Amino acid sequence: MLTTPVRQLGESERRAVEQLLDLDPYAGAQVAERVAARGLGWWRSEGRVLGYGPRRSLESVCWLGGNLTPVLATEPAIAAYADLLGGQERLCSSIVGRADAVLGLWERLASTWGPARDVRPNQPLLATDTVPTVAPDPQVRHVRRGEVDLLFPAAVAMYTEEVGVSPLSEDAGRGYYRRVQDLVRSGRAYVRIVNGEVVFKAELAVVTRRTAQVQGVWVAPEWRGRGIAAAAMAAVVRDALHRFAPTVSLYVNDFNEAARRVYERCGFRPMGTLATVLF
């Protein structure tokens, strides 16, 4: 008798999945973008979407790919996902989502999937639908297609500083380079360049019909403390609201007080708390 109501979802349930993801448009943004782009056919995607609940009343979904991302996962859903996943080899590089779901999953999976390289239990999730009152930096602009090689070292520096490992350690960075290239081609990478050097960068790593999610915010070390970040972020938010989505969202480590002050100045408001487990 099947006792765990978790199943892999297919294209026939796409509408139900999209309706459920609309209930948590910020924490579920990455999953929503992938579903919109590739649907639920696993052969056309880089991951699978698991569902919890009866077929006529889907309660939660969980993306399983390079990341593991539970969305709207109640305590029973968390237990059910963990029961299924605990019997499988860990292939994801992180677990990320609402803090209660991520930490609940990790509590159940740590004995078989651990140890983790890092656990970040408190990452404020922020969003805004308002153009910032901070004057935008006129020197912040989209990265041009021919500037990928100029942006890439800054992207590597940001990733290494934020995640704690270099993106060059896997496949010599080819996959990460393609990701940066794709963001530039889609007009979702922003930069400020001074004397041929990147001093600020940010990307809209996720774009859905509900939100544009900013990631990869970075200021060159020698430019930190000069007060350029708020105006630069204001330029990014203004453009993202104008060109991509009705809201802009992001999440930040709770200990990054300087960044949190910048985001507050740019009008971001709390929308909950995420957590990340890194492997």
Image (tube, rainbow, N blue to C red):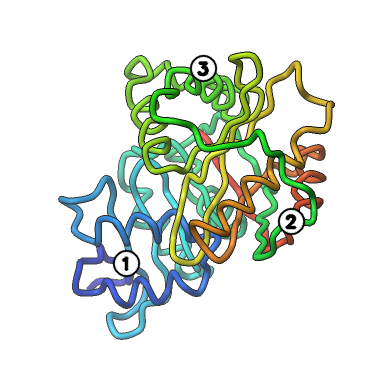
Graded by Cα atoms within 10 Å as few (under 14), some (14 to 19) or many (20 or more), the crowding at tag 2 reads many
Residue 204 image offset from top left, x and y in percent: 51, 46
Q: Which residue is tagged 3?
A: 153
The dot on residue 6 is 1
Point out residue 44 in the picture as x, y percentages from the top left corner: 18, 51
Q: Nearer the viewer, mark 3 or mark 1?
A: 3
The quarter of the picture where residue 178 lies is top left
Please report the residue visible at 25 percent of the width from the left and 71 percent of the height from the top: 2
Disc 2 or 1, which lies upstream in sequence?
1
Answer left or right for 134 relative to 32. Answer: right
Q: Which amino acid is tagged 2?
A: Pro
| Mark 3 in CB contact with mark 1 (< 8 angstroms) | no
Distance from label 3 to label 1 (Cα)?
42 Å
Residue that carries the numbered disc 2 in the rendered image: 132
Tell me the crowding category of disc 3: few under 14, some 14 to 19, or many 20 or more residues within 10 angstroms, Cα based: few
Of labels 3 and 2, the one closer to you: 2
SS of the residue at dot 2? loop
Which circle marks residue 201 in the picture?
none
Q: Is residue 142 above or below residue 87?
A: above
Quadrant of the snapshot with the N terminus: bottom left
Which sits earlier in the primary sequence, circle 3 or circle 1? 1
Q: Could you tell me how far apart the alpha carbons at marks 2 and 1 are, in whole angstroms?
A: 42 Å
Does dot 1 land on a helix, a strand or a loop?
strand
The type of residue carrying mark 3 is Pro
Instruction: Identify the residue at horizontal 27%, vertical 45% (top origin).
Output: 46
